[in-house]
Image: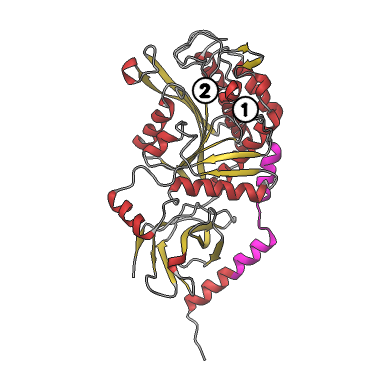
Amino acid sequence: MKIISPIKILSLLSVAVFSQSVNAQDTDKRLYEIIEKVSADSIEHDIRKLAGFGTRNTFSDTVSDTRGIGAARRWIKSEFDNISDNCDNCLDVFYQKDHVTPEDGQRIPHAAWVVNVVAIQKGTRYPNRYIIMSGDIDSRASNTMDFTTDAPGANDNASGMAGTMEAARVLSKYDFESSIIYVGLSGEEQGLFGGKGLAEYAKKNNWEVIGILNNDMIGNIEGVDGVIDNRSFRIFSEPVPPTETEQERRMRRFYGGEVDGISRQLARYVHHTVETYMPEMNPMMIYRLDRFGRGGHHRPFNDLGFAGIRIMEAHENYNRQHQDIRTENGIEYGDVIEGVNFNYAKKLTAVNAINLASLAWAPPAPSKVEIGGIVEPSTKLRWEPVDGNIVGYKIYWRDTTASQWQHSRFVGKLTEFTLEGIVIDNYLFGVAAVGENGHESMVVFPSGTFR
């Protein structure tokens, strides 16, 4: 008679209990509530308000109460303050700023403060772990050095800023284990200065950043190519961190992982959450840091080793981006209100909100994930235990050519497991922690090997 160890029995029991809970409710109804609570009317109001400041160029008027970047950021802060007042001061709202001069870049006409508006909703269990949603405050005309011409920036990027504010309104009514940051970043059009400043602030203050969801243009459904699509959107992510060491690069050459960096795992997480809770949407994984040769405010976070992705519309209209308002040869140029679809902006705001919530409700990801199984018929994985309310861990694997995780196995609270009959040569692997509430951490790709 085969004797099963007590540890093995406990593991099997935890798997059974978890399986029963998943079968009973394999989705979190609160995420459906969050989707329903996002308001297109509220987003429209905020986009119109932001576009109404005339120009939000980073170097525009900072004194007026009705025009310029100063009036815009003060209004955004007042809205975050109001949201906080309605949730018993659950948000810590402040300005984070850095001074720039013409010596800092070619798009800086004069010295100025680049001011971000930050609202932090502290987590109940992991207050120093942060998932961030960002939109850009600033706008631009055809000439980015022109800080006086009207540049309403209705889609680029009042839409992303309005979505961030709406996410704060909705999610501030919930408690989360990890902290959520809602932020309006400035200086994007002049060289990503706002993102750079906040990323450096996070590093200096030892924030544990889960990742940043950068929203830049989430309101246009009519592409310059004539395509109209109100369901598709793009998720841009870089393949591996630019901060990887030479040793990590050498390991990747022999063990794989060319598309398994932390930002790519964040993109997969968003993709999976959307397919689960918003199946009417079509998330498009774009294997690139950003649009071809272009940049966004997630990049400064990537530069410092943080996970970060860009969420945006699928079909851009270049006639409405970075253009003075005018009509030429029968073509209307300019980033005006008429180019924004508020229901679409609502959908992409909901995409962000459910992922912020899911990650903030999830336990921390496993650390020190290692893999073994060279010239063996099975694959072995081990990792450090997670301190949190977890029911266990889930191992994921996929074909080396697959874009998404295809297979998974829940293994309870074990911190080492062998996948019998799964040959290491033919798949890529990862491990996630599973909370008692069913929410999972991001998948962690192995960073080391063992025998």
Q: Quadrant of the C terminus?
A: bottom left
* Residue beneath the point at 47% across and 52% down: 364
Instruction: Relative to 240, say whether 227 is above or below.
Output: above
Residue 346 shown left or right of residue 98 in the figure: right
Q: Position of residue 72 (x, y in %)?
A: 54, 17
Given residues 288 and 383, the one toward you in this image is 288
* Residue beneath the point at 47% across and 25% down: 94
Looking at the image, how many numbered discs can be counted on the residues? 2
Query: Label 2: which residue?
Result: 137
Distance between the alpha carbons at the discs numbered 1 and 2: 24 Å
Q: Amino acid at mark 1?
A: Val
Given residues 329 and 399, the one toward you in this image is 329
Q: Position of residue 198 (x, y in %)?
A: 41, 31
Q: Is residue 24 magenta?
A: yes
Main SS of the magenta segment? helix
Residue 312 location, quadrant? top right
Residue 346 location, quadrant? top right
Mark 1 burial class by Cα count in 10 Å: few <14, some 14-19, many 20+? few
* Residue beneath the point at 54% across and 54% down: 404
Q: Is residue 416 visible?
A: no
Instruction: Relative to 25, say whether 86 is above or below.
Output: above
Query: Label 1: which residue?
Result: 224
Looking at the image, is mark 1 or mark 2 nearer the viewer? 1
Q: Secondary structure at mark 2?
A: loop
Q: Position of residue 221 (x, y in %)?
A: 66, 31
Start and end of the magenta stretch?
16-37
Applied colour scheme: secondary structure
